[in-house]
Image: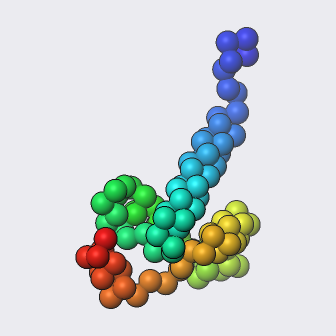
Amino acid sequence: EEIGFEWDAISVANKAYEDGWNQRIQQLCEFKEEHGHCRVPHKFKDDPAFGKWVGRQRGECKRQQSSTGGPTPIWKKRITELEEIGFEWEVAKEDEEGWNERF
């Protein structure tokens, strides 16, 4: 303990995961401010990992909604947080392709 050893590896991992979530939420807010919407293209040239993250949120939400008992408490919180920003859960394929071409 004197050297700063973390005994609770789970809380360290959870904090790192939560920090990553908060960074992506901030990035999404910045994207929305710049572009006026949250439809980040899956193949976002400026940050491909961010585009993939946005796609994973849509997929995970669908999975959570269809699971027995509905979303977990943490996902309920995250869904609310994303919706408050203006996140769109369904993006038409044509819209995404057109957006990718224009972007």
Q: Is residue 8 above or below residue 64?
A: above
Q: Quadrant of the C terminus?
A: bottom left
Q: Nearer the viewer, residue 72 or 32?
A: 32
Q: Residue at x 63, y 70 (%)?
A: 85
Q: Nearer the viewer, residue 67 or 89?
A: 89
Location of residue 37 in the rendering, given as x and y in whole percent from the top left corner: 51, 74
Location of residue 1 in the rendering, given as x and y in whole percent from the top left corner: 73, 16
Image side of residue 33 versus residue 92, left or right:
right
> Given the current orientation, which residue lies at the most extreme left position?
101
Q: Residue at x 40, y 63 (%)?
A: 51
Q: Residue at x 57, y 74 (%)?
A: 87
Camera sees residue 76: yes
Q: Give the colour scheme of this rendering.
A: rainbow
Image side of residue 3 versus residue 24, left or right:
right
Location of residue 75 in the rendering, given as x and y in whole percent from the top left corner: 66, 67
Camera sees residue 55: no
> Given the current orientation, which residue lies at the most extreme top position?
2
Q: Nearer the viewer, residue 48 or 62?
A: 48
Q: Is residue 17 above or below residue 55?
A: above
Q: How many marks?
A: 0
Location of residue 23 in the rendering, given as x and y in whole percent from the top left corner: 57, 50
Q: Nearer the viewer, residue 12 or 90?
A: 90
